[in-house]
Image (cartoon, rainbow, N blue to C red):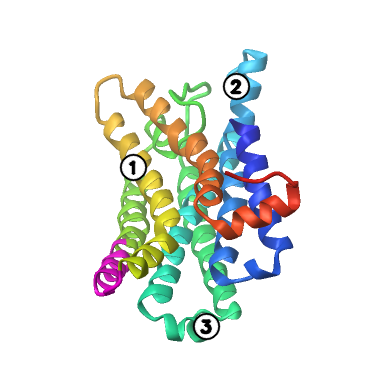
Amino acid sequence: MYLITVFGNLLIILAISSDSHLHTPMYFFLSNLSFVDICFTSTTVPKMLWNIQTQSKVITYAGCLTQMYFFILFAGFDDFLLTVMAYDRFVAICHPLHYTVIMKPSYGVLLVLVVWVMSVLNSLLESLTVLRLSFCTEVEISHFFCEINQVVQLACSDTFLNTMVMYFATVLLGGGPLAGILYSYSKIVSSILGISLAQGKYKAFSTCASHLSVVSLFYCTILGVYLSSAAPQSSHSGAVASVMYTVVTPMLNPFIYSLRNRDIKRALKRITGVPVM
């Protein structure tokens, strides 16, 4: 699954970079999403595979903090980038005549830079609050990676500040992007319903179907993690549910975009020489 995730997303990046017809804001965002998906799954899966192979489940304090920092960084970037992609589809469908004026290449780069800065600052803040905590000599994390909530619960010192920062980040950085996506799609649906021809409706919907599928998969799996963590035997069920958004979702994203997009199919066929279904 990890190899499929890496090679699948690398193929998407290669297809977009090698085809001049795909040098548009939508595909620029998609290539960034594929890059981040590789990084996101690489923060946890290689270490997990090493643990399975060596039958050793040890991670150093520095290694745990590093893993936590990059996990939060790439998870936040994924979340913000999906919101930017929803905005891109909103402009394309609701303001098609102004799309090239609004979504200029320089503006797309600026949006991605803003997303990077916000993700780095958020990850840095949450990681630094963990750095101030004191722990016992040996602690056992009931997870397959250093998940921040699990780590904070094992601290011997006061965790009030950490809890407040995590709640603030969840509400502002989790709820904010979701609200932006829901608003964009409410406008998109309204615009699609206003199209008289059935063919026009299908064409408009098909341009955002892949993104909508990825968003649904991303948020549904995260919701599953939170619901499972609230249930009895939460540590085991929470770890199982976490596999969905740390491993399964990044693996499925290339399939979702390649199977539903003619431009990506054409670019992949030219690179590999094999027709994509």
Label 2 vs label 3, nearer the camera: 3
Residue at far top of view? 55
Q: Marks 1 and 2, Cα distance to the nearest angstrom?
A: 31 Å
* Residue 159 visible somewhere in the drawing: no
Residue sitting at x 60%, y 56%: 264
Tell me where residue 28 appears, x and y as whole percent. Answer: 60, 65
Please state which amino acid type lies under the numbered disc 3.
Answer: Thr
Q: Earlier in the sequence, mark 2 or mark 3?
A: 2
The residue that disc 3 covers is: 100
Residue sitting at x 53%, y 67%: 26
Q: Which stretch did the figure color magenta?
A: 182-197
Q: Marks 1 and 3, Cα distance to the nearest angstrom?
A: 33 Å
Query: Which is more toward the observer, 186 or 84?
Result: 186
| Residue 220 marker | 1
Tell me where residue 113 appears, x and y as whole percent. Answer: 57, 69
The residue that disc 2 covers is: 58
Label 1 vs label 2, nearer the camera: 1
Identify the secondary structure beneath mark 2: loop
Label 1 vs label 3, nearer the camera: 3
Q: Marks 2 and 3, Cα distance to the nearest angstrom?
A: 52 Å
User: Which image quadrant for residue 157?
Assistant: top left
Please state which amino acid type lies under the numbered disc 1.
Answer: Cys
